[in-house]
Amino acid sequence: MTWDRTGEVLNLIFNPEFTLAIAAMMFYCGFRLRMKFYVLRRFSVSSGVAGGLVMALFVWLLYFPGMAVVHFDYSLQMPLIAMFFTRVGLTGSFTALRKGGRTLITYLVACWVLVLFQNLLGVGLAGLFDMHPLLGVMAGAVSMEGGHNLAAIFGPLVESMGVSGAAAAAMSAATFGIIAGGLLGAPMANWLIKRHDLDLVTNYDDLYKGYHEDNEKEDVEIHDFIQTLGIIVAIMALGWRAWPPASRK
């Protein structure tokens, strides 16, 4: 962490290690806030969003009166996002797909239709306001379905194609999606669950049984952790070679 002054404004500069440490602390802060305040759980506000809002408020309180400007180093952002999606892929299995059955297929088809609708609407609105159609895609399925992670991945890639403001449009749309989902989607889902008296999986054991046989359950040891981490890093290394350089920045 370093700092300097530009006129009367103090610049706080956090290196990648400090940025990662702050992100981890804010995530834990968000987790504790969700445990303490029922309204956050009621509206399905994630730990990352809750902690991020706390940090955003802190940064704004420093910036608004002109006291200081906070600068984070995002060098580790892309590798960590890649690790997240790689880990998600490793959790899938053909057994889980078979158990999903018709419900899973219905869900996938609904997602595909929604992706198409979001992109068509985004491109249509972009054309209506005389904007580049790729900005409509950034504000469409990239951010609405993919969230901030895909927005951070595809934003720089589209900007490297000459579409200025693509990253900002994608991140802004993803943020709007989270807020709209919290204010509209979560209450609606909660109402539907109560209306139809649906049973929800609320403990780890029931969730685990949905993907594994009972006799497969075992304690995770350090060997398993290192082995899984090695597989993730190896897959990331292979994929990183094929990914466009502009998206790695």
Image: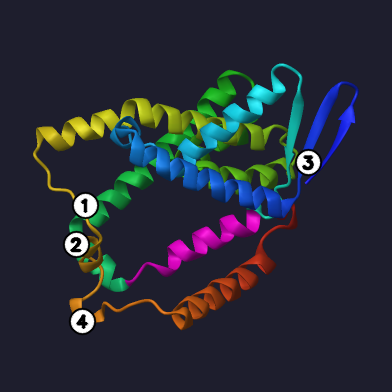
The mark found on residue 13 in the picture is 3
Magenta-drawn segment: 78-93
**Distance of mark 4 from mark 3, alpha carbons?**
51 Å
Q: Earlier in the sequence, mark 1 or mark 3?
A: 3
State if disc 3 and disc 2 touch (CB < 8 Å): no
- Please name the residue shown 62% across and 51% down the image: 21
Q: Is residue 85 magenta?
A: yes
Give the residue number, with chain letter if any, for mark 4. Answer: 215
Circle 2 SS class: helix
Residue 243: mark? none
Vertical comparison of 247 with 59: above or below:
below
Mark 3 secondary-structure assignment? strand
Q: Assign the magenta stretch its main secondary structure.
A: helix
Give the label on residue 206, or none: 2
Circle 2/circle 1 CB separation < 8 Å: yes
Q: Above or below — where is 163 with respect to 89?
A: above
Decide: few, some or many residues near mark 3? Use Cα within 10 Å; few <14, some 14-19, many ≥20. some
Return the x and y of residue 59 as percentages of the image width and height.
Answer: 65, 29
